[in-house]
Image (tube, helix red, strand yellow):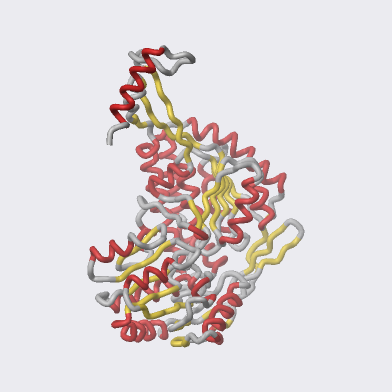
């Protein structure tokens, strides 16, 4: 079982399967965090002073260092999370793709652009430019300790900011590894630093006068982060988890939909914010879909081996959450199709498929974050959409249908930040797409052009090209100027 034992100002991290001691890390206190931010602010002056081509060259060198160390980094991920080797390697590959995109596209996305000045300010030329915040604090999660935080880190760096990264207390070694690769390349410029620690370290980072904070974690912790940042009006980007649904229409490829549900629901032991936790199936194909899903899920067994389909629960409390949700679903009348509460054998949880679960069960309303799929029949796609949207979360969703037009129309009705049609997590490998949610899933975006602008301040600039023929932008405009301006205003805006 993964556990975390606190020693005086130290974190003792152990293997999630064996309990073997892995390493000790400092718990950075207020002074240590403030010192890191001070170093970052000085480095930010150098970094933002480089032109876009220079930053791109440096970021691509960093990318190459991360990519070249994929086997070592995947090993660190495995040792701290217990996930499969393939899962750890895939995580690094996806993170590097997004880093590469941010480095190569920042200059184009953030360059100064001219905008129309309109009729009233015809004598003015106007432009918008994007400038870095300065120092960005990134607080990362443990379930994807490279892919998720590096999305914010890479786009913040590409936008010209320095970054102080606080990894999860369960995966500090991953954060240290990433920061060390930067230090090896640029020892005199701590543009990327790591501070290890627990929740007190994260709180210190929120209060350390950084210019923006990016946080990924539970909605409950997100509220704590926002409260700390509100003390200094520090803006935040929040990704607060999800309760994502997969919709299967009557015309869908049921085999493909079942495979996707297994991947989206069981992958990484179900510890995926944008994974599949609910499945809504149109009634005519409900039983055949459930039969296919059942057959696939029964073949899956977790394990500690590098090639296991998925590994253990990473944190010691998560098995109890999974057990509680499964028990509640069954007590409320749900049906156990694969597994049940006895499938929870810490640190592992075997696949659980529940059917006909009441919509007010915690297995439907709360984030389970385990290898549990709730499958419910619906009369039609309209009911599926209503049930999908009947949650406080809104991170992503999936739709399976052979009708492309219908799939896109249904996607447009989902209250979610991202939707995949005929796949799950399809957007995760597309670096140009923004990622983020609504409601308890958070706000703000990482990845893509929106992610670059998320870590930039928009600044408006005008310059007067010539004196206006009618000047009303003065303390006491003339009566004739106002008369002519009001007449033009009426002709332009007063007619139906």
Residue 180 in view here: no
The image quarter in which residue 90 lies? bottom left
Look at 39% across and 17% down and name the residue there.
482
The image quarter in which residue 261 lies? bottom left
Q: Residue furthest right?
A: 8
The image quarter in which residue 279 lies? bottom left
- How many marks are shown on the rendered structure? 0
Look at 39% across and 69% down and name the residue there.
386
Residue 127 placement, left or right of 24: left
Look at 71% across and 50% down and name the residue there.
29
Task: Relative to 359, say whether 73 is above or below.
Answer: above
In the foreground, 311 or 216:
216
Residue 449 placement, left or right of 303: left
Task: Relative to 234, say whether 168 is above or below.
Answer: below
Coordinates of residue 202 in the picture (x, y in percent): 64, 52
Coordinates of residue 179 in the picture (x, y in percent): 55, 49
In the foreground, 23 or 9:
9
Coordinates of residue 160 in the picture (x, y in percent): 48, 38
Q: Quadrant of the N terminus?
A: bottom right
In the foreground, 163 or 14:
163
């Amino acid at each position: 079982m993964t556990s975390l034992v606190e020693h005086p100002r130290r974190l003792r991290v152990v293997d999630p399967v064996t309990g073997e001691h892995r390493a000790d890390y400092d718990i950075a206190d207020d002074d240590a965090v403030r010192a890191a931010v001070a170093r970052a602010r000085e480095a930010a002056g150098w970094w933002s002073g480089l032109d876009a081509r220079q930053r791109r060259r440096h970021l691509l060198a960093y990318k190459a260092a991360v990519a070249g160390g994929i086997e070592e980094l995947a090993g660190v991920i495995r040792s701290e999370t217990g996930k499969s080797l393939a899962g750890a390697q895939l995580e690094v590959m996806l993170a590097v793709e997004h880093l590469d995109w941010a480095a190569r596209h920042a200059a184009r996305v953030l360059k100064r652009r001219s905008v129309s000045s309109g009729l009233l300010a015809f004598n003015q030329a106007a432009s918008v430019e994007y400038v870095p915040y300065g120092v960005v604090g990134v607080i990362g999660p443990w379930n994807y300790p490279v892919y998720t935080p590096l999305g914010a880190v890479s786009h913040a760096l590409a936008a010209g900011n320095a970054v102080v990264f606080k990894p999860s207390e369960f995966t500090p070694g991953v954060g240290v590894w990433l920061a060390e690769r930067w230090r090896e390349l640029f020892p005199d410029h701590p543009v990327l630093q790591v501070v290890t620690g627990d929740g007190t370290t994260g709180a210190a980072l929120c209060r350390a006068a950084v210019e923006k904070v990016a946080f990924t974690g539970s909605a409950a912790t997100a509220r704590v982060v926002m409260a700390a940042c509100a003390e200094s009006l520090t803006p935040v980007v929040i990704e607060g988890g999800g309760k994502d649904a997969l919709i299967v229409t009557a015309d869908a490829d049921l085999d493909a939909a079942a495979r996707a549900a297994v991947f989206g629901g069981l992958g990484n032991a179900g510890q995926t914010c944008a994974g599949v936790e609910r499945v809504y199936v149109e009634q005519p194909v409900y039983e055949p879909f459930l039969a296919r899903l059942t057959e696939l899920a029964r073949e899956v067994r977790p394990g500690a081996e590098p090639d296991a389909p998925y590994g253990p629960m990473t944190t010691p409390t998560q098995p109890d959450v999974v057990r509680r949700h499964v028990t509640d679903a069954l007590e409320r009348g749900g049906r156990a199709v694969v597994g049940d509460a006895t499938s929870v054998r810490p640190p592992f949880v075997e696949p659980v498929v529940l059917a006909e679960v009441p919509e007010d069960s915690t297995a439907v309303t709360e984030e389970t974050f385990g290898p549990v799929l709730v499958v419910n029949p619906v009369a039609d796609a309209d009911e599926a959409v209503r049930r999908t949207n009947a949650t406080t979360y809104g991170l992503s969703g999936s739709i399976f249908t052979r009708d492309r037009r219908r799939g896109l129309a249904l996607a447009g009705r989902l209250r979610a930040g991202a939707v995949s049609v005929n796949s799950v997590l399809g957007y995760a490998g597309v670096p140009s797409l923004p990622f983020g949610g609504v409601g308890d899933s958070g706000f703000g975006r990482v990845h893509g052009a929106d992610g670059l602008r998320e870590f930039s301040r928009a600044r408006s600039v005008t310059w007067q090209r010539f004196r206006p023929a009618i000047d009303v932008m003065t303390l006491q405009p003339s009566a004739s100027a106002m008369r002519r301006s009001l007449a033009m205003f009426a002709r332009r805006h007063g007619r139906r």
